[in-house]
Amino acid sequence: MESNTHTGELTAATASTAVESSVPYAPALSANFQKSHANDDGFTLEVHFSAPAGFTIVFGASGAGKTTLLDCVVGLATPDTGSIRIGTRVLFDALAGINVDVPTRKVGYVFQDLALFPHMTVEENIAYGLHQFDRQEREQRVGSILDAFRIRDLRVRHPREVSGGERQRVALARSLVTDPCILLLDEPLAALDSPTKGLILDDLRRWNDEHRIPILYVTHSREEVFALGERVLVLDRGRVLAQGTPHDVMNAPRQETIAQLAGFENIFDAVVSAVHEDRGTMTCQLAGSNVELETPLVRTGEGSRMRIGIRAGDVLLATQRPEGLSARNVLLGKVVSVVRRDVLIVTRVAIGVEMEVHLTLAARDALKLEAGREVWLIVKTHSCHLMSV
């Protein structure tokens, strides 16, 4: 469902789509379709969304349907029902019997593995889809995109002779030199370090400021959602759970799946035990325990069932009971485990329920954290995000 098995087919097809000039306006992608996988445990992708010019981040766990979505847009997979349009241009319409073939869809697609031709130079890779133009036009297009992605100095090298970041630039340049009406990116920058990734994306933003096409960018990274996205589309098991600005969708999730994807490591069932309208808060008791948390006030009443999401990075630890804090939730607990993950320390603390806490190496050493140590756990009221059951 999330594989890139069509790489070879699409590389040649996508690269040969450059017969039209850039559209004079910024058309939006409109996708309303259903696609089932008969041999994939009954998985069905069903989407209804619009993606305007600019970045739309497609976010979701492995198996959510992200690659299937891209394959349907580019034409490598055929939906069972529905339609796909870019502006007024119909790429697929089941009822009308329209299914534009891949080479004429004008869709740019960059895979995770990039699919560069190893026997061709950088310049030859980029120019591959421009055979329908005369020599002067080909040279002008290739030269312009080489400059846009700052790879002119690499033009006579082969893919094996350039760095990973440079190969990403070449793959982007090859997809964009044809002036596609939409660009699909299936985590092509996942293996890069943050500074390299940031520089490449800055160049892509500048290119799109001039051309204004929709860009669907698939990622698992919450950081990329906030850094890149003008809009975010959250997929889970083939369904669109939410769409909107990254802040609206990811910072205040109303569904547990979105909370998990958005980085809320701690999610608890709870019951509202008291409502404090005068101070804009509620008290919620966590299920299966006597633990009570003060949370922001929402429109509900005592006895209502809720879920509470708390990011592990929003929790503080202290080895002595803190005084004079603005935080309303100060809870005594005991360290269950302390595990290092690269430069991150993942600590689990039992407070009646177990809560995950993320710390730096320096904080672990300063607090002398180890299993069995008593600690105070501190959570601000507005770090408790409420979700419906």
Image (cartoon, rainbow, N blue to C red):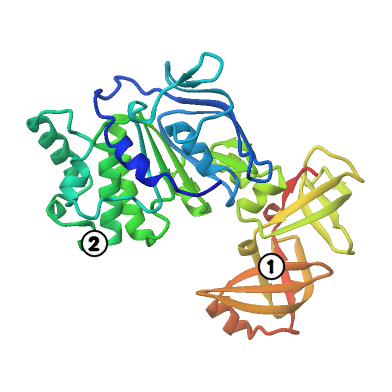
Q: Position of residue 252 (x, y in %)?
A: 65, 44
Mark 1: which secondary structure?
Answer: strand
CA gap, disc 2 and disc 1: 43 Å
Q: Can residue 294 be seen in this snapshot?
A: yes
Most foreground residue, 295 or 138: 138
Furthest-left residue in view?
136
Amino acid type of disc 2?
A: Arg
Tell me the kind of residue under disc 1: Glu
- Taking depth in this image into account, of 378 and 257 the one nearest to the observer is 257
Q: Relative to residue 19, is residue 237 depicted above or below?
A: below
Q: Residue 160: which numbered mark, if any?
A: 2
Q: Quadrant of residue 131?
A: top left
Snapshot quadrant of residue 27 = top left
| Foreground residue among 11 and 318 | 11
Q: Is residue 40 left or right of residue 353?
A: left
> Where is mark 1, residue-wise?
356
Residue drawn at x 76%, y 52% as measured from the top left: 308
Crowding at dot 2, Cα within 10 Å, few <14 / some 14-19 / many 20+, comes out as few
Label whose residue precedes the other's in the sequence (2 or 1):
2
Q: Count neighbours of disc 1 (C-alpha within 10 A) and say few if under 14, some if 14 to 19, many if 20 or more.
A: many
Q: Work out which residue is located at the far right of the displayed protein and give it.
A: 303
Point out the residue furthest to the front here.
39
* Residue 197 pos. (x, y %): 35, 55
Q: Quadrant of residue 330?
A: bottom right
